[in-house]
Image (cartoon, grey):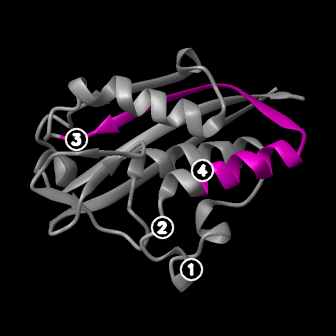
């Protein structure tokens, strides 16, 4: 049994779509990054890689590599799930939190949960997705960025 944790943060900017857990969220700003900048999926990927004692997502999908420019993070997550499986692990569950002042994410949680579960070949009951604010503190609290935390439990195959 292995536990992994992941974290990611991206700046919010105008002119980009907001993608969280593979779902496009209606909002006037999106997250800035080399790929689609999906902070939630990135945090989950790092948690999975860490639990399997593998390198971080920047190692497997370096931002300076043009192959990953604008990449769909759900496809990257699927590759990470394969890597973890090749190491002899299977995912027992994932728990995650998105930290954002706006937009309100509650209406989107079921779709995000279902999309992430599908990408990891899990039941939605194995994927926890929550949202909270940063109480107007720091860059996230000021609406300049979004962050996400994730924890995963891996079991031997």
Label disc, if present, on residue 71 of the rendered structure: 2
Tag 2, which secondary structure? loop
Span of residues in magenta: 76-100
Please tell me which of labels 3 and 4 falls first in the chain.
4
Please tell me which of labels 3 and 2 falls first in the chain.
2
Please tell me which of labels 3 and 1 falls first in the chain.
1
Crowding at dot 4, Cα within 10 Å, few <14 / some 14-19 / many 20+, comes out as: many
Tag 3, which secondary structure? loop
Q: Is residue 86 magenta?
A: yes
Indicate the position of residue 8 as horizontal and vertical percent values: 43, 53
Tag 1, which secondary structure? helix
> Which quadrant holds the C terminus?
top right
Crowding at dot 1, Cα within 10 Å, few <14 / some 14-19 / many 20+, comes out as: few
To which residue does mark 4 refer?
A: 77
Tag 4, which secondary structure? helix
To which residue does mark 1 refer?
A: 67
Indicate the position of residue 111 as horizontal and vertical percent values: 37, 29
Quote the CA–CA distance across marks 4 and 1: 15 Å
Q: Residue at x 78, y 46 (%)?
A: 84
To which residue does mark 3 refer?
A: 100
- Look at the image and tell me whether residue 53 can be seen: no
Crowding at dot 3, Cα within 10 Å, few <14 / some 14-19 / many 20+, comes out as: many
Tell me whether circle 1 and circle 2 mark residues in contact (CB < 8 Å).
yes
Quote the CA–CA distance across marks 3 and 2: 22 Å
Crowding at dot 2, Cα within 10 Å, few <14 / some 14-19 / many 20+, comes out as: some
Q: Is residue 88 magenta?
A: yes
Residue 96 drawn above or below residue 102: above
> Which quadrant holds the N terminus?
top right
Relative horizontal placement of residue 17, taking residue 82 as reference (left or right): left
Q: Residue at x 66, y 70 (%)?
A: 59
Relative horizontal placement of residue 109, taking residue 64 as reference (left or right): left
């Amino acid at each position: 049994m292995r536990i992994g944790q992941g974290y990611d943060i991206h700046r919010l900017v105008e002119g980009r779509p907001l993608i969280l857990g593979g779902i496009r969220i209606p909002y006037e700003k999106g997250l800035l990054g080399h790929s689609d900048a999906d902070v939630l999926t990135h945090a989950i990927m790092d948690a999975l890689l860490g639990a399997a004692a593998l390198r971080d997502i920047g190692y497997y999908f370096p931002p300076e590599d043009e192959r990953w420019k604008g990449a769909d993070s759900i496809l990257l997550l699927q590759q990470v799930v394969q890597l973890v499986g090749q190491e002899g692990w299977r995912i027992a569950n994932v728990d995650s939190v998105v930290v954002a002042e706006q937009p309100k994410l509650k209406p989107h949680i079921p779709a995000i949960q279902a999309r992430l579960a599908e990408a990891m070949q899990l039941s939605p009951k194995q994927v926890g997705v929550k949202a909270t604010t940063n109480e107007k503190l720091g860059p996230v609290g000021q609406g300049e960025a979004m962050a996400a935390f994730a924890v995963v439990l891996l079991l031997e195959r």
